[in-house]
Amino acid sequence: MSSTWAQVTVDARDPARLAHWWAEALGYRVVTETPDEVEIRPSLAGAPGLVFVPVPDDKKVKNRLHLDLRPSDQEAEVERLVDMGARHVDVGQDEEVGWVVLADPEGNEFCVLPAA
């Protein structure tokens, strides 16, 4: 027996706002939106999805799990994401690494990798 990866759940102060931000960032679409849950996927049946659920507190420490994005043009993608509201963060990475660490509007870190 094995399992299939269906989704990642993200705690958020404002799930709708954060879900729509990530949908735009990833080119995903909102497939479910209720006050208790907003789910985005690459397509209606595509996987994996991201599910955003409400929590009463702000993020306080570095993520234990984060997404890595691999665009065809790292510099242009970083600029686009920052223009959308992401910000550069320092999680202790050294300047010689090939990726850029950003945080989404609620402070969740993610990496933008160089093109393959």
Image (tube, rainbow, N blue to C red):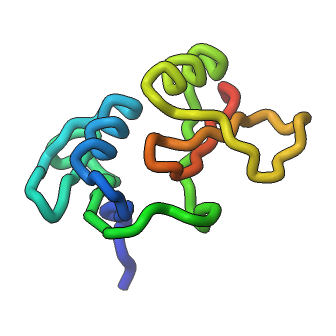
Quadrant containing the C terminus in the rendered view: top right
Which of the 4 image quadrants contains residue 36? bottom left
Q: Position of residue 19 (x, y in %)?
A: 29, 45
Picture layout, residue 88 above or below residue 56: above
Q: Nearer the viewer, residue 43 or 53?
A: 53
Left of 11 or right of it: where is 115?
right
Q: Position of residue 25 (x, y in %)?
A: 40, 31
Picture layout, residue 17 above or below residue 66: above
Write the residue at 57% across / 18% down.
79
Residue with the most extreme front position: 57
Quadrant containing the N terminus in the rendered view: bottom left
Q: Position of residue 57 (x, y in %)?
A: 40, 68
Residue with the most extreme bottom position: 1
Picture layout, residue 23 above or below residue 47: above
Q: Nearer the viewer, residue 14 or 19?
A: 14
Write the residue at 11% across / 51% down.
33
Q: Nearer the viewer, residue 58 or 10?
A: 58
